[in-house]
Amino acid sequence: ACAAVREAVGPDIDLMIDGYHWYSRTEALYIGKALEKLNFAWFEEPMEEESMASYAWLAENLSIPIIGPESLGGKHHSRADWVKAGACDILRAGANGVGGISPTLKVAHLAESFGMDCEVHGNGAASLAVIGAIKNCRWYERGLLHPFLDYDEPAAYLNSLVDPMDENGMVTLPDRPGLGEDINFAYIEANTVSHD
């Protein structure tokens, strides 16, 4: 599948893969070696993240950048351990996964202190705000290829998307107040179950 995608888009498009902690060490190494030949930009979360030693081993044995941890708890504290152990080449954090905007910024600054990129996990207003505030993130994970979600439809509580994509495939920071969301207050009022 990865080879077919590379063939379809050609050599000049950056491709990444999220293994969603599905593989064993040997499987991750095998896949990683194949991804190196296909010139993939990174290999994300291929194994269970509770085994930092497995990630350090994989990062040592592959030239493709390993990105993580994504699902691991511990906010910036666990990510500091990953950097120290050499368990990843790119740090991963997101406002929804590490406890909000401030902990995500701490992870990004931690990564920057070690000359690493920090890729922000997940889309939405909080993630977009973090990306706008840091300089060591190259990508915005809008979720274009998810098979069951339509990222071009706003959530019911929003009037419009906070992250519309332009004709060149670019997303810009919103200029509305706060985090830039266009909140549908009528929807919220109509669906409120109680007022305290």
Image (cartoon, rainbow, N blue to C red):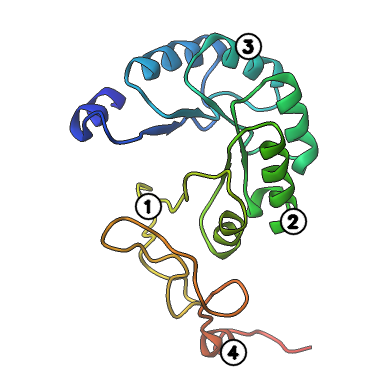
Crowding near pointer 2: few (<14 within 10 Å), some, many (20+)?
few
Q: Is residue 26 left or right of residue 143?
A: right
Residue 172 in percent (x, y) is at 44, 64
**Residue 102 has which mark?**
2
Give the secondary structure at mark 3.
helix
Q: Would you identify the image quadrant in which residue 32 lies?
A: top left
Q: Is residue 177 above or below residue 12?
A: below
Residue at mark 3: 57
Residue at mark 4: 189
Q: Amino acid at mark 3?
A: Trp
Q: Residue 84 or 54: which is nearer the viewer?
A: 84
Q: Amino acid at mark 2?
A: Ser
Residue 51 in percent (x, y) is at 70, 21
Give the mark nearer the N terminus: 3 vs 2: 3
Q: Nearer the viewer, mark 2 or mark 4?
A: 2
Q: Are marks 1 and 2 in contact (CB under 8 Å)?
A: no
Q: CA distance from mark 3 to mark 2?
A: 30 Å
Give the mark nearer the N terminus: 2 vs 4: 2
**Residue 148 has which mark?**
1
Q: Nearer the viewer, mark 1 or mark 3?
A: 3
Give the secondary structure at mark 4.
helix
Q: Would you identify the image quadrant in which residue 136 lies?
A: top right
Q: CA distance from mark 2 to mark 4?
A: 29 Å
Give the secondary structure at mark 1.
loop
Give the mark nearer the N terminus: 4 vs 1: 1
Give the mark nearer the N terminus: 1 vs 3: 3
Q: Are marks 2 and 4 in contact (CB under 8 Å)?
A: no
Q: Amino acid at mark 1?
A: Phe
